[in-house]
Image (cartoon, coloured by chain):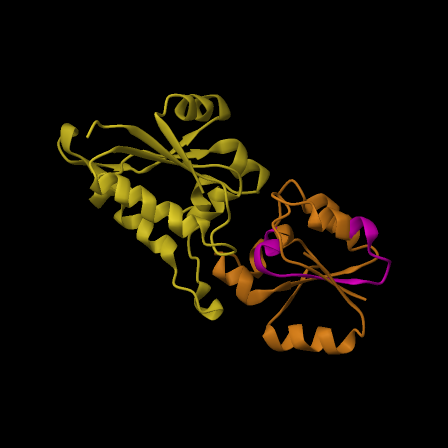
Chain colours: A orange, B yellow
Amino acid sequence: MLHIVNKSPFEKNSLASCLRLSAEESTILLIEDAVYAALVNTSVSESVHRAMDEKRIVALEPDLAARGFDANHLINGVELVDYDGFVTLTVDNPKIQSWL
Amino acid sequence: MSKKRIVCLNRRAPHGTNYPQEGFEVALIGAAFDQDVAIAFVDDGVFQLKSEQNPRNLGLKNFTRSFGALADYEICEVYVEIESLTERGLVEDDLMTLIWEDEDDGDIEKPLLRFVGQDEMSQIISEADVVLNF
């Protein structure tokens, strides 16, 4: 199952709920302000890093670049996708949950 | 019109909503009306000051480059809360470099961003005549 989060983890609890309630083997795609959750050395880095033991975490590169960050700022193991990759994820996953 | 101390309190990340751009414009308008304007960045607002932002692929103009014009509008007090930076893994070097020329001090160039702890930020907010939230 694909989970999509679009809110900053410092402002809303969408990411925390997603990490808590998504099943193992899920893919979690971070877009818009949720890309901040993929950064190293933040107050949520540890929980995101821990989630990658059983889940795949992906961030949308154009949203990351818009905010002044690149692959060098990411938690080890977070994958980046472009818009084509975003489309592929939605095609590959019959079920999608958006944590609005 | 009496002069008021206006603090624009920015607490949101730059490109997810329109609030930050509105806050910036209101600060300029306040300065244009000769008010005593300060800008404060707290919580996700500190992300507005990240260097090298490029929202072109989102079809957005990078309004954060306009922060370079603040000093031209005589907005020379811009406060950044250190605790908010730390929670987000940011340090001063991650932010854009902004300067102003102090007319009262021989036009010396000084850093526009002033990094303050939460006690000082609390004081800045409480001493304002008006706090505008974005």
Which stretch did the figure color magenta? A19-36
Residue A35 among magenta residues: yes
Residue A83 placed where, x, y %?
59, 74
Identify the residue at image location x=67%, y=46%.
A45
Residue A89 placed where, x, y %?
72, 73
Identify the residue at image location x=82%, y=52%.
A21
Q: Could you tell whether B113 is left or right of A75 in the image?
A: left
Indicate the quadrant where residue B127 lies. top left
- Observer-nearest residue: B7 or A92? B7
Residue B59 placed where, x, y %?
45, 69
Residue A6 among magenta residues: no
- Observer-nearest residue: B103 or A99? A99
Q: Is residue A72 visible?
A: yes
Instruction: Check the image and report above or below for B39 versus A83.
Output: above
Residue A10 placed where, x, y %?
61, 43
Indicate the quadrant where residue B28 lies. top left
Identify the residue at image location x=20%, y=36%.
B34
Q: Could you tell whether B10 is left or right of A3 in the image?
A: left
Q: Is residue B97 visible?
A: no
Q: Quadrant of the N terminus of chain B?
A: top left
Q: Could you tell whether B74 is left or right of B83 in the image?
A: left
